Image: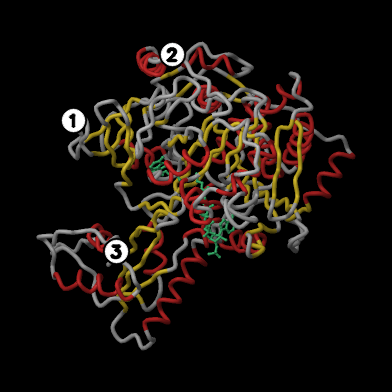
Amino acid sequence: MSAATPTAPEGAYAAVHTASLADRNGFWLKAAAAIDWDVAPTRAFDAEQGVYGRWFPDARLNVCRNAVDRHAEGGRADQAAIIHDSPVTGTKRRITYGELRDEVAVLAGILADLGVTKGDRVVIYMPMVPEALFGMLACARIGAIHSVVFGGFAANELAARIEDAAPKVVLAASCGIEPARVVAYKPLLDAAIARSTHKPDACLILQRPQGEAGLVEGRDRDWAETVARARRAGRRAEPVPVAATDPLYILYTSGTTGRPKGVVRDSGGYCVALAWSMANLYGVAPGEVYFCASDIGWVVGHSYIVYAPLLHGCTTVLYEGKPVGTPDAGAFWRVVAEHGGATLFTAPTALRAIKKEDPRAEKIAGHDLSRFRALFLAGERADPDSVAWAERALDRPVIDHWWQTETGWAIAGNPLGLERLPVKYGSTAKPMPGYDLHVLDESGKPVPPGTMGTIALKLPLPPGCLPTLWGSDERFRQSYLATFPGFYDTSDAGVVDEDGYVTVLGRTDDIINVAGHRLSTGGMEAVLAAHPDVAECAVIGIRDALKGEAPCGFVVLKAGVAKDPETVERELVARVREEIGPVAAFKLALTVGRLPKTRSGKILRGTMKRIADGEDYAMPPTIEDPATLEEIGDSLKARGIGG
Ligand code: COA
Ligand code: AMP
């Protein structure tokens, strides 16, 4: 290895994790020193507030001041805060902390003039452009709550989020750019607003030269013109201190029904947890370059493209491109080398895409990776083959860590900055501080080491994790706290071994993970079921060599449908794309005569999945008719799936 990973003495991790649970207040108050508070916390946790307690109940801060102003004023004014590297547009832009403060202050002033005040919501529907970050930080500056919606979602999904968050203003771009096409965002936004009963007062539209959009009179404003006018008028807004417990953002994620869950992130606890993680988990120092190749529409993007690197005074790389095809499988290595990245954070699916195109890792050659220390993976299970391939190719630690939108930062990982624990392939290493992790059986009893169960986190959750769901403490309780009283149910199955290493095996609910994107099969079933020719349906996630999982829908047509099944199948594929979005990657709908069910009418999705994945399966004793499973196998075989 050409650049040393900072290490601490053996046992450092264990001491830290033990201290974080034994003296919760002492541990997190000490970590809170990394943040500039308007009113410093005197207590870390208050068990009496909120659903299960709240972090830093008596403290006040401004997140934008911490992420931007204090660096601009503290000697980093000329350091790059953001490097926008966009192979899809052929542009690069470097924005210093000084410039970032200026951009954000002006935009915050514009939001304030549009009537946005503390606690108001702002939806952001934008691609990977710096203005999206300006928007997020401008909200934080005036205490408004942003809700970023991933660009790969269709109008319907955007409408559901607008309906729930009820934003005063929407920030959007005219288009996003995918390697093969320009995605017009504005028509999707218009359709979403038309569908939603809530209407925003105003939309600020960033016109991109690749595809300009028509503006709706009275509602839409041109971003560049509005900013220019505000600058001429000297309009700026200064940071507004908020309670540490005030929401910073809402991020919607797939739930077990079609209705997305609005994960709420608070302000103070989030900053403290992220600051801790930058130094201790990622081993990155202020001033270094941090490259997270996710998307700002996902939690990883919120935390590690935007907030954590900026809170820590790093330079964040905002990469508008793909791991392959923009232009080739060397893209990530080019970015790391060109900008001097200390770490890279991506999803295993991206690594598999790179490995597939460049199996001998020849594209690494010629790139100066001397400042690069480690590769971090998250979002889905990291397959040992890909981890081993990357270790060999890069000669650096490859660290898998486990996350959820709900937690905001890693639940388990290998804290490189604290102590580099030995890597065990397939495992996400050990719980991070504050996570009191247990594996429980169905009755809520702990299982012995090495035994599979549901991973549950003993309450309270550490700072940074969700305190509730937007507008619904009750849904939060029902979704996460009801199954195992006193615990947060992760809905992930897993194992902890004798050494305390955590292995995450997959979801216990209907959520599937497609190319690192979290999707609800229930949501897709709702779309299929709404087709007039469909009597019933089931969607399962089947193994996919590149994307980890891919959705596959089985449908039974209503009696008397005259259309040929292939036509209906094509219509169903188009409907899911139209209703949920291209990101669902729903490409396979198969008509069958009947769905396999138990005698009590439960669809045997688990067995269907085993057949599709080519695994052995036992005939469920409660099956109504074994021939239905054979039919599933035959229809998959006809498409070359299963075996
Ligand atoms: N806006 C609009 N459309 C988008 C989009 C966006 N921001 N992101 C993806 N899409 C579209 C794609 O164009 C594609 O559409 P298509 O069906 O017309 O081809 C579809 O959604 C699926 O996209 P994607 O998941 O990117 O699949 P892909 O086959 O194009 O690429 C990978 C495969 C592996 C390269 C890609 O999935 C990838 O980079 N994954 C990493 C994901 C990641 O970092 N996740 C982070 C979670 S921590
Ligand atoms: P999301 O909320 O989109 O971040 O998705 C969270 C889900 O992704 C988790 O509940 C896991 O099922 C899965 N996941 C995330 N990271 C990992 C990982 N490192 N290993 C296994 N599964 C993971």
**Residue linked to disc 3:** 612
Q: Amino acid at mark 1?
A: Pro
The CA distance from mark 2 to mark 1 is 29 Å
Residue sitting at x 18%, y 59%: 617
Q: Quadrant of the N terminus?
A: top right
Q: Residue furthest right?
A: 232
Q: Is residue 378 above or below residue 314?
A: below
Specify which label sits upstream in the sequence, 3 or 1.
1
**Residue linked to disc 1:** 448
The CA distance from mark 3 to mark 1 is 31 Å
- Would residue 547 appear left or right of 122 to someone viewing this image? left
Residue 510 in the image: x percent, y percent?
33, 53
Q: Does the residue tagged 2 have its C-beta within 8 Å of any atom of ligand 2?
A: no
The CA distance from mark 2 to mark 3 is 47 Å
Q: Amino acid at mark 2?
A: Pro
**Residue linked to disc 2:** 9
Residue sitting at x 49%, y 45%: 347
Q: Is residue 464 above or below residue 187?
A: above
Q: Nearer the viewer, mark 2 or mark 1?
A: 2
- Would residue 4 appear left or right of 632 to someone viewing this image? right
Q: Residue furthest left?
A: 621
